[in-house]
Each structure stands twice: as structure tokens, then as C-alpha cells.
Image (cartoon, helix red, strand yellow):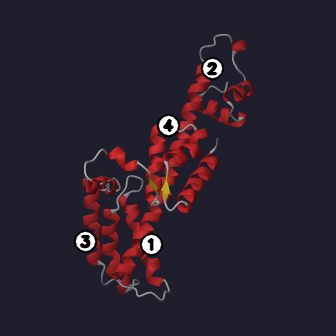
Amino acid sequence: MDIQKFQEKLAEICELGEKSGKILKPQQIKECFGEMDLDKSQLIKILQYLKLKGITIEGAEVALHTSGEEQETEPEEQEQKVPLTPEEEEYLKEYLEGLEEQKAGEGQTELYLKYLPAAAKMAAEMNCEEIFLADLIQEANISLLMAVGEETEDEKDDNWFMGRIRAGIRHAIEEQTQRKFEDDYLVAKVEKLEAAVRELTEDEDDENSKFSVEELAIILDMDEEEIRDVLRLTGDDK
């Protein structure tokens, strides 16, 4: 199955979660992705992605092995917060100091400048492994810029601006998380196919007994062109 199939399944399970009040059962996820033969780490990443979308998995809290109802949800919230590295801490410090110096700069509105530090700090609070802090701050700034220029009947107070910034950051994290899923899926697929091809070919000393691409396609239930791509990557396309 190709990456398009994976995307379709991911969209399908998200839609199912929305229709079921943002609550899914583990069995529904297994049924949706069952035929794709994903490993445990890939399934965990799918659960993390659903969590970012606000979709809860029934029974997921049990796996946390915590005592007391109040403690059960605390680790779940902490999972999304990735501490800044020393380099990121230094970058954030220098960035905020730079904002102080450009307050009198031209070409930016006073409103935009007012919320830039808050946008950077929110990006740091929502720091994740999928996006560099600098890129996350940039996404926050873009969301802020769009919010400043947005025409709305709502009152543009602090809560409104911070809500827009948070939504933009969350959207960027979701997009990057899905992209990483796709990349990891493709890598795993190539590795799995490479192992299967090697197992079927490298132990055969007799050239006449080796499998052709057409035969491998039938045995592995894969597309011939995809197998040729993997053979080229492994150097076995001679």
C-alpha cells in the first residue's frame, strides 16, 4: 500500500473520531489500519496525532498506570510539552532581546509588535520534536500577522489574539506530525521490502535460480516498479 492509502486511512479515522464525539475505541483504529501492517511505534504515533486533533482513545489512560483520578490526566498533558534544549533556550533569549531592539522599527504595526514576544513564548511552551523552535516561532508570527489583519465582529482582546496564535501553532504541529508519519511509513516500507528482497535473492548462488522482478512482485504482492526502485537503492538491480 502506498502513501496515498495511508493518508486516506488517517483522514478516515479522524473523520470517524469527529463523528463519534472525539472518542474512539482501540478496535476502531486496529480495523482502520489493520491491513497496513504497521508496527507498534507507528501505531503509537498515530495515537499521538489523534491526541493533537483532540480525539480521545477509550482506555488510553489505563496505560499510564497512575493512581487517583486527578493524576491520570496530568501525564497526558505533559507528553505534549518538550523541554527546550540549551541551544533553543539561548535562541529564544536572543530572539526576545532582538524584539526589544526593533520596537521602534518601521513597517510593522504597534499591535503586531505588542504580541510578538507573547507569540514566541507560546511557541516555546508548545515546543515539539517535529518542528524546530525557530520554525515554530515563525508559524506563530504568521498566525499573529493574519490575526492582526483579520476582519471580525469579535473583540480583538488578549484572549482572542492568543487563541488565534495557539490555533496556528497547533495546525503547524499537526501538519508536520502527519508529514513525519508519512516519511517514517515510507522508510519502514523500503526497509521491509529490502529485507524481503535480500532474503529471496542473496542466498541463491545460481543466477538461474534467482527471482525476476515480475516473480518478486507476485511473491511479495508489490508493484513491479516499486520493487525496481528498492533494488536500485540496494544495488541489486544488476
Image coordinates of residue 149 in percent, x first then y, are 47, 83
> In this figure, which residue is indicated by the disc labeled 4?
39
Quadrant for the N terminus, please: top right
Q: Position of residue 6 (x, y in %)?
A: 60, 47
- Which residue lies under the disc numbered 2? 200
CB-based contact (under 8 Å), mark 3 and mark 2: no
The reply to whether residue 98 is visible in this rendering is: yes
Q: Choose mark 2 or mark 1, whichever is in front.
A: 2
Residue 142's disc number: 1
Instruction: Report how far apart the C-alphas of labels 1 and 3 lie in the structure.
Output: 20 Å
First-in-chain label (1 vs 3): 3
**Residue at 26% across / 54% down in the picture?**
71
At 29% from the left and 75% from the top, the residue drawn is 99
Secondary structure beneath disc 2?
A: helix
Amino acid carrying mark 1 in the image? Ile
Q: Quadrant of residue 168?
A: bottom left
In the image, which is nearer the foreground, mark 1 or mark 3?
A: 1
Instruction: Indicate the secondary structure of the residue bearing disc 4.
Output: loop
Disc 3 target residue: 97
